[in-house]
Amino acid sequence: VVDGVNALAVDMFFLKCGSHDNVPRLMDVFLDDSSREGKLTLIYGKTDCHLSTIIQSKQLLTDDHVQYFAYQLLRALKFAHSAGVCHGAVSPMNIHVCVNCDLQLRQFHCPGVPWPKDHDSSSSSYETNTNNSPP
């Protein structure tokens, strides 16, 4: 599956550059031998929700919340861009948040690996074949 290969390539880029608090760490990779395509499942650290869930909730976001989220998002983008990795669609669905307000930007794109044919970079509905690790 191209998106699994892309995500794995991005993780290899990040491993070469070092780790970052606002970029998820790859914890495990499973190859499904039963599928003809050899589907990859990538396991990342657990987060509690997407930023879109928080935005749609009735929870009050203070200016401090917004500033802290923006600061972390910019740190993640700076780290990725300095590694030569881009992000196709920064959206609340691609920003994962923990209960302590730490966030991780997910679904980066590795240069040289094509997007899947059905990928629309203006949409947040594109999902890679990844899972959070169990609690």
Image (cartoon, helix red, strand yellow):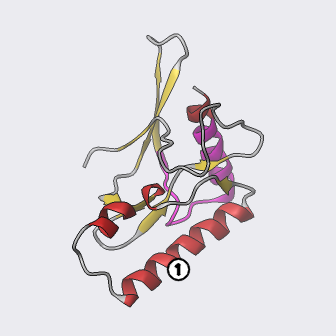
Q: Is residue 25 magenta?
A: yes
Q: Where does residue 75 sit, x and y in percent of width and height?
A: 58, 73
Q: Classify mark 1: residues with Cα within 10 Å, few (<14), some (14-19) or many (20+).
A: few
Image point (43%, 67%), residue name: 103
Residue 115 or residue 35, whichever sits in front:
115
101 sits left or right of 125 in the view = left
Quick check: 73 above or below 52? below
Image point (52%, 10%), residue name: 36
Split into 4 quadrants, where in the image is the N terminus? top right
Q: Residue furthest bottom?
A: 63
6 sits left or right of 84 in the view = left
Q: Which residue was labeled with disc 1?
A: 71
Q: Where does residue 95 sit, x and y in percent of width and height?
A: 45, 61
- The three-letter code of the residue at mark 1 reads Tyr
Quick check: 126 above or below 68? above
Q: Where does residue 13 sit, x and y in percent of width and height?
A: 68, 49
Quick check: 16 above or below 32? below
Q: Where does residue 83 sit, x and y in percent of width and height?
A: 72, 59
The residue range painted magenta reads 6-26
Q: Is residue 111 magenta?
A: no
Image point (34%, 57%), residue name: 47
